[in-house]
Amino acid sequence: METPPIEIEAKFAVPRLDPIRSQLLDRSARLVLPRLQETNLRFDDADGRLGRDGKVLRLRTNHDTRLTYKAPGPDPEHRVEVEVEVDDAAAARQLLERLGFQVVLVYEKYRETYALAGARVMLDELPFGLFVEVEAEDLVSVRTTAEALGLDWSERLALGYLRLFESLRQRHGWSFRDATFANFAGRPTPGFEDVIEVAGRR
């Protein structure tokens, strides 16, 4: 059996994205994808088995549609990831539902993607905060790229977006389940320090 592909990345909360974008442009980073809105549907079975095991089954739509499976790796910076592109988001959702999975969470973000020295840098705007993700083929490259952009390696986040949102939701008593921009309309966005306090570091 083939060894499953491993995603190697680190995530950082930031108060503003402009300084990171400026650092990227100063280093002649290549814009891979302009700022696009993403819609992510996360699936689980009726017993919540995937979530309990730290696994993710996600259907994501932005410039294309991708079905992704993620599972814990040997440490927080490494995760098993299997991803396929699909032509029809509605058909993919129907297939998953026929297999017994159901949508348990919808979350949205705006993402802008750059390539820099063999790494990918994603500037993410979520309804509850601003973040930078750095992904590369090895952890040394992830760290080198992050530090070149002025990101403190010791401040990389311990939580993924969904666990971070759930922690914020409980802290603030939000009654809605989904992390969509519509749900946050007219609602103050959590401050940077609020996100950092809830997220913790790796």
Image (spheres, rainbow, N blue to C red):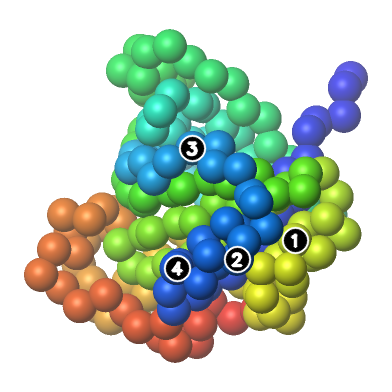
Q: Is residue 48 visible?
A: yes
Left or right? Give the position of 173 relative to 16: left
What residue is shown with label 3? Answer: 33
Q: Earlier in the sequence, mark 3 or mark 2?
A: 2
The Cα–Cα distance between marks 1 and 4, rounded to whole angstroms, is 17 Å
Q: Position of residue 57 (x, y in %)?
A: 52, 36
Q: CA distance from mark 3 to mark 2?
A: 17 Å
Q: Is residue 68 above or below residue 153?
A: above
Inspect the image, locate mark 4, and give the three-letter code of the amino acid beneath it.
Asp
Type of the residue with mark 2: Gln
Where disc 1 sits, the SS reads helix
Is 34 placed above or below 20 here? above
Residue holding disc 4: 18
Left or right, residue 114 beside residue 117: left
Q: Could you tell me residue 176's position as x and y percent?
A: 21, 61
When asked about the image quadrant of residue 144, the answer is bottom right
Q: Are the residues at dot 3 and dot 4 in contact (C-beta closer than 8 Å)? A: no
Badge 3 marks a residue whose secondary structure is strand
Which residue occupies 43% across, 41% down? 34
Q: Residue flagged by tag 1: what amino acid is it?
A: Thr
Which mark identifies residue 145? Answer: 1
Q: Residues within 10 Å of mark 4 (few under 14, many from 20)?
A: few
- Looking at the image, which residue is at 36% across and 59% down? 126
Query: Alpha carbon of mark 4 to alpha carbon of mark 2: how far?
Result: 9 Å
